[in-house]
Image (cartoon, helix red, strand yellow):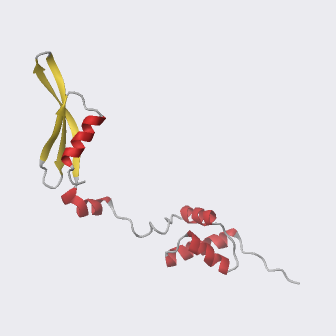
Amino acid sequence: MSQVLQPTMREIANLAVRMARENSWGYSRIQGALENLGHRAGRTTIASILKDNGIEPAPERGKRVTWSQFLKAHWSVLAAADFFTVEVWGPRGLGTFYVFFVIELATRRVEIAGITPGPNEAWMMQVGRIHTPNA
């Protein structure tokens, strides 16, 4: 009576990698395909095999957008925000005020969003409400 030898783990790993590359299948689909061929491998094992071979999960594969592509696609709606400080003479002497500003990257238009002697959460929430009326 001859005994059928199980393939080595390396052979199963090679099959999993081949299935992922040729079909863009995810872990569960590869697991099912291996099972149809008589090989049992857990989903996490398949995930580890693909990760070790530099293959990302199926939803991520082939859908990566470079930072440059992202910026070009969204440039007209991107903005940056930050604070700068201004020293002001007042009745009590020199005081520091914090100026919160927003700059539209495409046009480089700067808008002063608010000025306060002490920014805190409540102040930031109010600035957000004022400048995003339709959100």
Q: Quadrant location of residue 15?
A: bottom right
Q: Position of residue 87 (x, y in %)?
A: 15, 25
Q: Is residue 123 left or right of residue 88?
A: right
The part of the image, by quadrant, that contains residue 118 is top left
Which residue does the image show at 19% across and 45% down from the upper left? 130
Residue at 46 percent of width and 68 percent of height: 59
- Residue 113 sits in which quadrant? top left
**In the figure, is residue 80 to the left or right of 25?**
left
Q: Is residue 120 above or below residue 49?
A: above
Q: Along the horizontal axis of the image, is 38 left or right of 17? A: right
Residue placed most toward the observer, 23 or 31: 31
* Residue 62 screen position, x and y as percent: 41, 70
Residue farthest right in this picture: 1
Q: How many numbered discs sit on the rendered protein?
A: 0
Using the image as rendered, state which of residue 111 and residue 59 is in the foreground: 111
Q: Quadrant of the C terminus?
A: bottom left
